[in-house]
Structure formats: structure tokens, C-alpha cells
Image (cartoon, grey):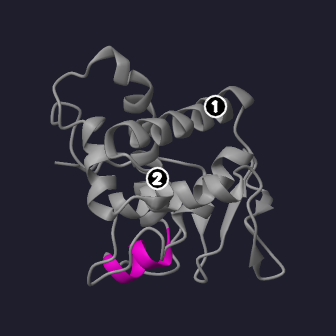
């Protein structure tokens, strides 16, 4: 069974679901949409399609929007377009590994796979297993990263934050006073 975990990123989504990146000083350094049109800065068109399908497998459309509706693939492209080169290489290598693994185990590529084939693909490298064969390590690392980024991208989008969770559209935490319980409670 695939499970969800929370991740963190220095990104914010606006009410239009357009995603912006911020530097350490809080200045906007990049917008994922330009002139109302989105185009990838890091991923190729094929990789965007692969990432979109994998993300949508993790958070599919039901009575609420799915990851593709929330444009999580755009979020992931943005994250990696400003990431260190070593992180970029690891992500692209992991995506290539997943496509090869899909061809080996499902007899099709990620972009041609049926939803149930993508679920089976991701389950082989998911955290539902206590341990994995060493040959799956690249896929396990990629899956954990993709899952965390999918969850973060989705729940910082208008679809995830406002429509699914029912949280206010425009909320910003300016300070954090700490946990409400004492040091001895956890």
C-alpha cells in the first residue's frame, strides 16, 4: 500500500495556483508561468509527462483534484530548476531508472502504462516493504523523493490546500511561537 508523508520546501502557491520560488531573503526569484503559459525549465517534455503520470498515480483524481490537476509536475520542475546540479542529476537518473524498471516489470514505458501498471511499478519501490533488494535502491530513493515532493506540491496548491483541506486561501505564518506543549511532552 502506498502511503503519504509530508515534506517541506521554500515555495508558496498563490490563489491562481501559480508557483513562485523565494530566495533566503524572501525575494521572488522565479515564476513557473510566463505570460500565462507554463513551459518546463528543467525537465524535457517527455520527462514532464512521466513525472505528471507518476505524481497522478500517487494522488489520483477522485471526488477531489489529482496531482496533475494541481500541476504538481510544474512544482517539481521548478524545485529542480533551482536545485544543485547533484540533486538534478540524481532526480533525472532516478526517473530514467524508473522508466527502465517499468519496461522490465510492466512491459511498457511510463507514458504508455495503464494506471494499474503504474501502481504496481511504484509499489515495488514503495515504503510498504520493510526492506528492498539492493537492485531497487535507485528506485527506492527516487520514489521517496517523488512522493515527498508530490505531497508538498499538492498540499501547497489551491486544489490541495483550499479545495481538499478547506484551509484559507491566503494565510501566511510570519512567526512561530513554538509548540503549545511543554518540553516534557512530545
Q: Which mark is residue 166?
A: none
Q: Residue at x 40, y 64 (%)?
A: 56
Residue 9 falls left or right of residue 123: right
Say which of 59 and 183 sits in front: 59
Please report the residue visible at 53 percent of the width from the left and 55 percent of the height from the top.
50
- Prevailing secondary structure class for the magenta stretch in the rendered image: helix
Q: Residues within 10 Å of mark 2 (few under 14, many from 20)?
A: many
**Disc on res. 87:** 1
Q: How many marks?
A: 2
The answer, for residue 166, to whether it is visible in the render is no
Task: Describe residue 49's horizontal placement relative to residue 119 as left or right.
Answer: right
Toward which corner of the image does residue 30 lie, by quadrant?
A: bottom right
What stretch of residues is rendered in magenta?
157-164
Residue 64: image location, x then y, percent: 32, 81
At x 23% / y 32%, what residue is drawn?
183
State yes or no: residue 90 in magenta: no
Vertical placement of 93 versus 29: above or below?
above
Rendered image quadrant of residue 117: bottom left
- Residue 143 % position (x, y): 40, 39
In depth, the one of 15 and 79 nearer the eye is: 79
Q: Which residue is mark 2?
A: 110
Q: Which is more toward the observer, 36 or 109?
A: 109
Amino acid at each position: 500500500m502506498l502511503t503519504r508523508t509530508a515534506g517541506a520546501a521554500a515555495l508558496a502557491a498563490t490563489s491562481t495556483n501559480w508557483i513562485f520560488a523565494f530566495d533566503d531573503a524572501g525575494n521572488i526569484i522565479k515564476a513557473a508561468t510566463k505570460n500565462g503559459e507554463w513551459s518546463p525549465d528543467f525537465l524535457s517534455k517527455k520527462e514532464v509527462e512521466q513525472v505528471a503520470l507518476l505524481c497522478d498515480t500517487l494522488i489520483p483524481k477522485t471526488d477531489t483534484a489529482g496531482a496533475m490537476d494541481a500541476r504538481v509536475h510544474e512544482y517539481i520542475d521548478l524545485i529542480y530548476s533551482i536545485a544543485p546540479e547533484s540533486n538534478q542529476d540524481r532526480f533525472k537518473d532516478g526517473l530514467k531508472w524508473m522508466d527502465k524498471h517499468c519496461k522490465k516489470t510492466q512491459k511498457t514505458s511510463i507514458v504508455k502504462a495503464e494506471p494499474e501498471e503504474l501502481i504496481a511499478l511504484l509499489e515495488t519501490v514503495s515504503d510498504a516493504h520493510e526492506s528492498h533488494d539492493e537492485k531497487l535502491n535507485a528506485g527506492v530513493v527516487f520514489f521517496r523523493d517523488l512522493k515527498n515532493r508530490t505531497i508538498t506540491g499538492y498540499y501547497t496548491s489551491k486544489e490541495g490546500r483550499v479545495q481538499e483541506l478547506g484551509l484559507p486561501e491566503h494565510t501566511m505564518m510570519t512567526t512561530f511561537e513554538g509548540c503549545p506543549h511543554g518540553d516534557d511532552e512530545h
